[in-house]
Image (cartoon, rainbow, N blue to C red):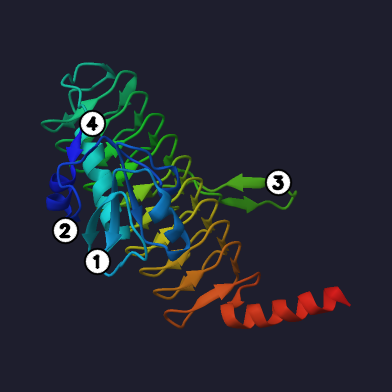
Amino acid sequence: MNITAQKIAEHLGGEVIGDPQVRVSAPARIEQGRPGTICFYANPKYENYVYTTKASILLVNKSFEPRQEVSATLIKVDNAYESVAILLDFFSSLKKSRPRSNRLFVRRPISSKIGRGTFVGRGTFVGKNVRIGKNCHIYPQVYLGDGVTIGDNALIYPGVRIYHDCVVGHDVIIHANAVIGADGFGFAPREDGSYRKIPHTGNVIIEDDVEIGAGTTIDRSTMGSTVIRRGVKLDNLCQIGHNAEVGENTVMAGLSGVAGSTKLGKRCIIAGQSGIAGHLTIADKTTLAAQSGIIGNIKKEGETLMGYPAISYRDYMRAYALFKASARK
């Protein structure tokens, strides 16, 4: 598979500076560029690689003006960082070969319906009354419990478990070994010090255009639904507790967790290893720095917080300067 600079530029709406017929077969990081690859430059920290890379094509912002000669052919675009996502999707679509057979099920009850163009791989279990939309790709060894609904164009990787009655929207990607709809961590203490399990009778609803990382778990609600809103992106090994709601276009990095019954606003950014306690409300556009801990409601929209318990990022850095100075004494 070889693609010319001209074809890539047309796909991205960019301008070619150099040889429009130079060909590449794969993307690469700019510091690892070699002949036949395409790299991108968007972060000024990496500018030195622009002049030393051996890549054949370099994707850059239109505003970029090189300070010395560049050997690679340039493709100038409005936003190099956004364009690289489009480019990687383009390469992925060219490589993808979709199987043509639907026959390799362990079980497919008559009550379950599978849309046209959908593939379900060997060893996948399809329960009763399951509804799978059109043009989905369900990899081998997936479990789909009774009453599960999956929208069109879903991509479900091996080892995913979707428990009964959960709902997955259109254009959703769920990576390997994610678990959707396990019981939440709900137990009632008894007088003798033991615990009685609280049944979880609800489900999980995942809206459209959501991506869920490998090993992530989303617990079903006690009653009603745990909800992942449209456009949410969850990294690997995240935990969403029962009855929680994650707002539209919120992103969470790896090892982050949201405890039960907490409502996370729209367009929040949750950095790695952050934790949010239960029964809270987090305002829209809240940003948590890595390893932050939230123990109270966040009412002001657009705040950036850090630390445990998390406080204003600016206040935290001032306090850290004092801690550091004290440590030197």
The answer to whether marks 1 and 2 mark residues whose Cβ atoms lie closer than 8 Å is: yes
What separation in Å lies between label 3 and label 1 (alpha carbons)?
65 Å
Q: Residues within 10 Å of mark 3 (few under 14, many from 20)?
A: few
Image-based side of 88 in relation to 29, left or right: left
Q: Which residue corresponds to mark 3?
A: 194
Which residue is pictured at 89% across the width and 77% down the height?
Answer: 329
What separation in Å lies between label 2 and label 4 (alpha carbons)?
27 Å
Q: Earlier in the sequence, mark 4 or mark 3?
A: 4
Q: Amino acid at mark 2?
A: Glu
Q: Which residue corresponds to mark 1?
A: 62
Residue farthest toward the right in the current orientation of the protein: 329
Looking at the rendered structure, the secondary structure element under dot 4 is: loop
Looking at the rendered structure, the secondary structure element under dot 3 is: loop
Residue 173 in the image: above or below residue 313: above
Say which quadrant the N terminus sits in.
top left
Q: Nearer the viewer, residue 189 or 294?
A: 294
Can residue 182 be seen here?
A: yes
Image-based side of 259 in relation to 267, left or right: right
Q: Which residue corresponds to mark 4?
A: 96
What separation in Å lies between label 4 and label 3 (alpha carbons)?
52 Å
Residue 246 in the image: above or below residue 318: above
Q: Residues within 10 Å of mark 1 (few under 14, many from 20)?
A: some
Front of the two marks 3 and 2:
2
The answer to whether marks 3 and 1 mark residues whose Cβ atoms lie closer than 8 Å is: no
Q: Which residue corresponds to mark 2?
A: 15
Which residue is pictured at 47% across the width and 71% down the height?
Answer: 287
Residue 134 in the image: above or below residue 241: above
Looking at the rendered structure, the secondary structure element under dot 2 is: strand
Q: Earlier in the sequence, mark 4 or mark 1?
A: 1
Which residue is pictured at 28% across the width and 19% down the height?
Answer: 107
What separation in Å lies between label 3 and label 2 (alpha carbons)?
68 Å
